Image (cartoon, rainbow, N blue to C red):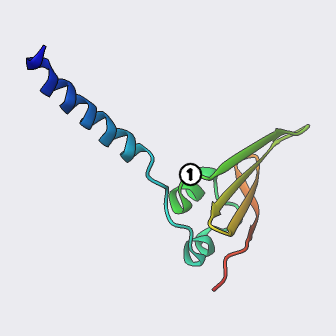
Amino acid sequence: MRSTLPALRASCVLLCALLLAACQPGKRITKANVDQVQEGMAKKQVESILGLPTSVETREMDITTKTTFVYVQGEDTVTIVFWGDKLETKQSTLKE
């Protein structure tokens, strides 16, 4: 039993390290990178600039899909609305 204890301990440490790495936050939201996001961009383009959104809401409309990405960082919020796969509007509470 004693010989398996070090291996078990090492496995637990490795598992904890992997879990912590998976919980790292996405990209930091700044005014500069929000300004890079432009009307007409695809969702994947926006994610490559801003990272994964804090929340996503998708609604099926009659002829297209409306998807809203919300990024929250502290008290700041960035909201990006897509019609289909194209960015339609963005709103931000970020200051200069």
Q: Quadrant of the N terminus?
A: top left
The x, y position of residue 92, in whole percent, is: 72, 71
What is the quadrant of residue 81 in the picture? Answer: bottom right
Residue at far bottom of view = 96
Residue at far front of view = 2
24 vs 63: above or below? below
Q: Left of 39 or right of it: where is 13?
A: left
Q: Residue at x 60, y 77 (%)?
A: 31
- Crowd class of label 1 (few under 14; some 14 to 19; many from 20; radius 10 Å): some
Q: Toward the viewer: 21 or 9?
A: 9
Q: Residue at x 70, y 56 (%)?
A: 70
Q: Quadrant of the C terminus?
A: bottom right
Q: Toward the viewer: 87 or 5?
A: 5
Q: Toward the viewer: 6 or 21?
A: 6
Q: Residue at x 64, y 53 (%)?
A: 42
Q: Left of 87 or right of it: where is 36?
A: left
Q: Left of 31 or right of it: where is 10?
A: left
The x, y position of residue 48, in whole percent, is: 51, 57
What is the quadrant of residue 14 in the picture? Answer: top left
Q: How many numbered circles does the render carry? A: 1
Q: Which residue is mark 1?
A: 52
Q: Secondary structure at mark 1?
A: loop
